[in-house]
Image: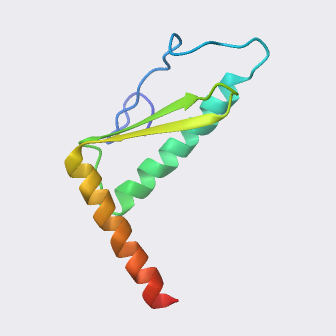
Amino acid sequence: MCGPGDDGFDGEAADLEAGIWVRGVDYVSGWRDAKEAAAELGDALKLVGVDGAGARLRAAAGPDGSGVVRFELSAARAREVAALAREAAARCRKAG
């Protein structure tokens, strides 16, 4: 989901100029964690029928080095994900 040759969700290279880097903060570990989490989220979205068109998952690291996943959607994909979330919530209420 996040590497070259992956289909579906777009990945982007790290933006090294996006913020201030602090000596001693392990940004790489946070970014790796976010990359894995983005791949998991992308796989889960594919399982429920949300394809990669109109969606972007991007791994990053926060100022403290923690992993951050940026999830950008087109308006159409946002509505699709919202409908899926409502359906899942309704099923959980019925099951509980």
x 48%, y 89%: residue: 95
Q: Where is residue 23 in the image (x, y as percent from the top left)?
A: 76, 11
x 38%, y 55%: residue: 45
Q: In this view, does 25 lie to the left or right of 31?
A: right
Q: Is residue 27 left or right of residue 17?
A: right
Reply above or below: 10 against 73: above
Image quadrant for the N terminus? Answer: top left
Colouring chosen for the image of the structure: rainbow
Q: Where is residue 15 in the image (x, y as percent from the top left)?
A: 48, 16
Please identify the quarter of the rendering in which residue 62 is found: top right
Reply above or below: 2 against 78: above
Please identify the quarter of the rendering in which residue 74 is found: top left
Reply above or below: 58 against 41: above
Q: Position of residue 38 (x, y in %)?
A: 50, 42
Q: Which residue lies furthest to the right in this view?
A: 24
Q: Is residue 69 left or right of residue 76?
A: right
x 45%, y 20%: residue: 13
Please identify the quarter of the rendering in which residue 85 is found: bottom left
Q: Position of residue 36 (x, y in %)?
A: 57, 41
Q: 50 and 21: which one is in front? A: 21
Q: In this view, does 82 lie to the left or right of 40?
A: left
Q: How many marks?
A: 0
Q: Which residue lies furthest to the left in this view?
A: 76
Q: 95 and 28: which one is in front? A: 95
